[in-house]
Image (cartoon, grey):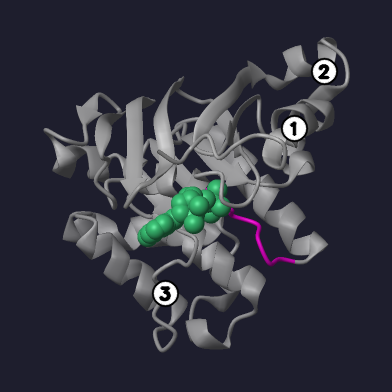
Amino acid sequence: MIEARAMSKRYGDRLAVDSISFEVARGEVVGFLGPNGAGKTTTMRMLTGFLPPTDGTAVIDGHDMLTDPLRARRSLGYLPESPPLYPEMDVEGYLRFVASIKGVPRGERRSAVERTLERCGLVDVRRRVIGALSKGYRQRVGLGQAIVHDPPVLILDEPTVGLDPVQIREIRTLISNLARPAAGGTQHTVILSTHILSEVEAICQRVILIHRGRKRVDAPIADLVREGGGLESVFARETARDESEPEAATV
Ligand SMILES: Nc1ncnc2c1ncn2[C@@H]1O[C@H](COP(=O)(O)OP(=O)(O)O)[C@@H](O)[C@H]1O
Ligand SMILES: [Mg+2]
């Protein structure tokens, strides 16, 4: 459902993402893990078509971002680092607006918005102005704008950053439910970035770890646990060479 094909991004003479390839299958929830500056956001922006790769491409639900960007982008929902919320709009009005710009037909918008309000736990604040909501609720609205057109693929950049522990648990539950919907609902395929190990263990089946723009690990979490040490020791091992290694990602 999500495929990165040898994607690279160069900023000036710095290679921020270095030929990353991976695939995410339908219904999987994959954690995209790496220290700050590893290249997670850059990779996700390329996956979503917001940033053109220097090399390579992304394929979303069979649509190549290079040759069929419109259909590729229609197939995905994206929660960026700072979601494009309009603080003066109320929650329901904003979601209706997003549904229209994402191409939900007029006759289906009301039900799309209702479904989103329910799934994101926003029913009680539907008439509230976004700017007056707590950070946790604003993050739910951010998730809402990502799912309102019911895309099969979700790309979430640090969905729990800046939230308190209660809000974190709520957002994690919400994400898990998106991948395991009630009968008849769309089964979403999710990749979410984080630098929090426990987040990956809590909601993901698989982890892709990047460091300095390169993929270092791509494995089911159960395998990492079975091999001993688990995520924490893998993370420590794969990101430990910061000081001792020359700047591998710079040419
Ligand atoms: N617009 C930009 N111009 C130049 N360098 C950038 C830009 N965006 C990101 N970078 C650099 O690319 C690297 C990866 O950044 P980023 O993808 O944001 O990492 P992460 O999301 O994993 O923290 C960092 O070294 C960052 O400084
Ligand atoms: Mg980032």
Mark 1 and mark 2 in contact? Answer it, CB < 8 Å: no
Disc 1 target residue: 235
The local secondary structure at tag 1 comes to: helix
Magenta includes 158? yes
Disc 3 target residue: 85
In the image, residue 17 sits, relative to residue 63, either above or below, namely below
In the rendered structure, the answer to whether residue 226 lies left or right of residue 251 reads right
Instruction: Tell me, yes or no, if residue 113 can be seen here.
Output: yes
Under mark 3, the amino acid is Leu
Q: Which residues are magenta?
A: 156-163
Nearer to us: label 1 or label 2 = 1
Under mark 2, the amino acid is Val
Under mark 1, the amino acid is Phe
Q: Quadrant of the N terminus?
A: top left
Disc 2 target residue: 225
Q: Mark on residue 118?
A: none
Q: Earlier in the sequence, mark 2 or mark 3?
A: 3
